[in-house]
Amino acid sequence: MEEYINKIKILLIEFTPNILTALAILIIGLFVINLMVKASKKIMQKSGLDITLQKFLGNLLGWGLKILLFITVISKLGVTTTSFAAIFAAAGLAVGLALQGSLANFAGGVLIMIFKPFKIGDLIEAQGEIGVVKEIEIFTTKLTGLSNKEIIIPNGSISNGTIVNYTTEGTRRVDLTFGVSYDADIKQTKEVLMSVLTSHPKVLKDPAPAITVSELADSSVNFAVRPWCKTEDYWTVYFDVTENTKIALDKAGIEIPYPHQVEIKR
């Protein structure tokens, strides 16, 4: 028993300095990495680099430095770098298979940085979600949804799927459909609808709004109403025109059909 205790004491005496040194390197290293990442972000900001690229490169630099720090700490604990490299190589296949999704997401992030289908602040639709791009990280892209919810989508899925960018062109067409009674005069209805569009301050004159008969439905004549607006005014125009159209049609005595229930007396 005494022999084992003596061996443990010897091991503690031998390895304690290495453990303390490795711990000190870890703490100081994390502190220095934090300072370096912050400094790099300030340099990129002063250089006028695109904010999307700033965040991506900042994340990439942080992860790269942490990996180097981890290798340094491990080697200080007595694991030689050659042995560590051999272990890493032997486990590479298993890790690669386990993290193939993450690697695909990383590759997707790189593709987004290269081709720039969107940038921070753009309103996009991807993977069935719509939101404003909040941040593009190494593995994921964060969106702020229309109801102010955070949406996180893997970069691999975004880069391999369809992306709709509503911000790129600067303007959007608002697609609305209104149905009126068959008894309504088509010319008068068009005039009323056009007056609603031209009186709204956020509806653009160029491109000019369009109003056409789109369908002769079972119980209504449907009009396709197509005003244009700036991207940021889309929902304001959508809701205002919908409300104002109902008010204008009522004032003009133009009926909007709806299902009627007839009570049969016996």
Image: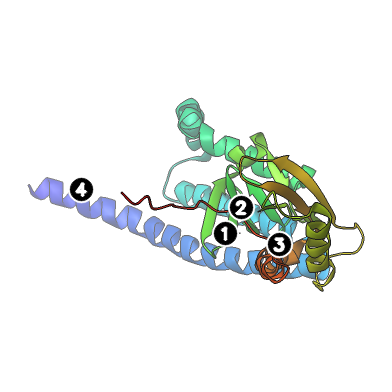
Q: Which residue is mark 2?
A: 130
Q: Earlier in the sequence, mark 1 or mark 2?
A: 2
Q: CA distance from mark 1 to mark 4?
A: 61 Å
Please provide percent x and percent y for residue 223. Answer: 74, 50
> What amino acid does circle 3 point to?
Gly
Q: Earlier in the sequence, mark 3 or mark 1?
A: 3
How packed mark 4 is, by other alpha carbons closer than 10 Å (few <14, some 14-19, many 20 or more), is few
Q: Earlier in the sequence, mark 2 or mark 4?
A: 4
The reply, left or right, for residue 225 in relation to residue 130 is right
> What amino acid does circle 1 point to?
Gly
Q: Is residue 86 visible?
A: no
Q: Which residue is mark 1?
A: 145
Q: CA distance from mark 1 to mark 2?
A: 6 Å
- Asked if labels 4 and 1 touch by Cβ distance under 8 angstroms, the answer is no
Q: Secondary structure at mark 4?
A: helix
> What amino acid does circle 2 point to?
Ile
Q: Which residue is mark 3?
A: 121
Q: Secondary structure at mark 3?
A: loop
Q: CA distance from mark 4 to mark 3?
A: 62 Å
Observer-nearest of 185 and 22 = 185
How packed mark 3 is, by other alpha carbons closer than 10 Å (few <14, some 14-19, many 20 or more), is some
Please identify the residue farthest to the front as the structure is shown.
Answer: 266
The reply, left or right, for residue 236 in relation to residue 173 is left
Q: Nearer the viewer, mark 4 or mark 3?
A: 3
- Asked if labels 2 and 1 touch by Cβ distance under 8 angstroms, the answer is yes
Q: Nearer the viewer, mark 3 or mark 1?
A: 1
How packed mark 2 is, by other alpha carbons closer than 10 Å (few <14, some 14-19, many 20 or more), is some
Q: Nearer the viewer, mark 3 or mark 2?
A: 2
- Asked if labels 2 and 3 touch by Cβ distance under 8 angstroms, the answer is no
Q: Secondary structure at mark 2?
A: strand
